[in-house]
Amino acid sequence: MSDADDIDSATLLSLGERIRNLRIERELTLAALSARSQISVGMLSHIERGRTSPSLKLLDRLRVALGVPLASFFDVDTDRNAEQGTVTRQGQRSTLLFSKTGLTKELLSPPGHPEMEFFMLSIAVGGGSGPDPWRRNGEKAGYVLQGRIELRIGEQSHLLAEGDAFQFDSRQPHSFQNLAETETKVIWIIRSSEVG
């Protein structure tokens, strides 16, 4: 039972270890995390052992259940220096690839700022957020660097091209899809009111 083509095996092992460590830090059993996240114990076990690639939706449910920002699941450089917490250098960015939805999330935020997360989304041709709309307490904003997307918020659809920006209450159901014939890149900012 492996979806290793979605996220490479080294990244899967590292991601699973971070999730297990977060669970243990919170003194949660697999069964307790399962109850909180509505993800089966078997699936959680496979994720923690790096045998299954969790979807972005599953990571979001784990994030809420563990009370952490999504950035907690990215491999963050642990070298301590004067810039840590302030600057993220190009070579220090962590990336998660979700090939099933054609989405790559690159963490731009420096560590230590759970209330606001800053990502570069690279969306493959036809790719997007997936079939089901998202909801999250807080706000989302972004800027289209290249390409075109359709951003659906509630019943409204917005066609956004290079240079367009957006911001909305992310408690509303929302989704997005690449409409360009090439990869689309979006700077994506999440201000969460769920982490505390």
Image (tube, rainbow, N blue to C red):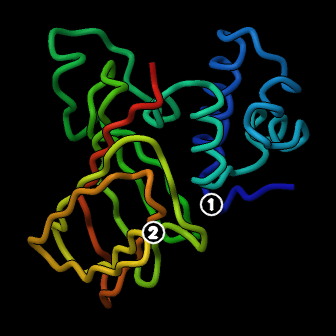
Residue drawn 66% across the image and 26% down it: 17
On-image quarter of the C terminus:
top left
Q: Looking at numbered disc 2 in the image, what kind of residue is underneath it?
A: Ser
Task: Measure the alpha-carbon separation of dots 1 and 2.
Answer: 20 Å
Q: Nearer the viewer, residue 32 or 178?
A: 32
Is residue 189 shown left or right of residue 25?
left
- Can you identify the residue that label 2 sits on? 175
Q: Residue 138 carries which label?
A: none
Q: Residue furthest bottom?
A: 181
Q: Looking at numbered disc 1 in the image, what kind of residue is underneath it?
A: Asp
Query: x, y percentage for residue 181?
Result: 32, 91
Is residue 132 shown left or right of residue 161?
right
Q: Which of 147 and 32 is in front in this view?
A: 32
Query: x, y percentage for residue 117?
Result: 32, 37
Residue drawn 39% across the image and 16% down it: 78
Is residue 196 shown left or right of residue 181?
right
Q: Which of 45 and 14 is in front in this view?
A: 45
Query: x, y percentage for residue 176?
Result: 41, 72
On-image quarter of the N terminus:
bottom right
Depth-wise, is mark 1 or mark 2 nearer the camera?
2
- Can you identify the residue that label 1 sits on? 6
Quadrant of the image occupied by residue 168: bottom left
- Helix, strand or loop status at disc 1: loop
The numbered mark, 1 or 2, whose residue comes first in the sequence reads: 1
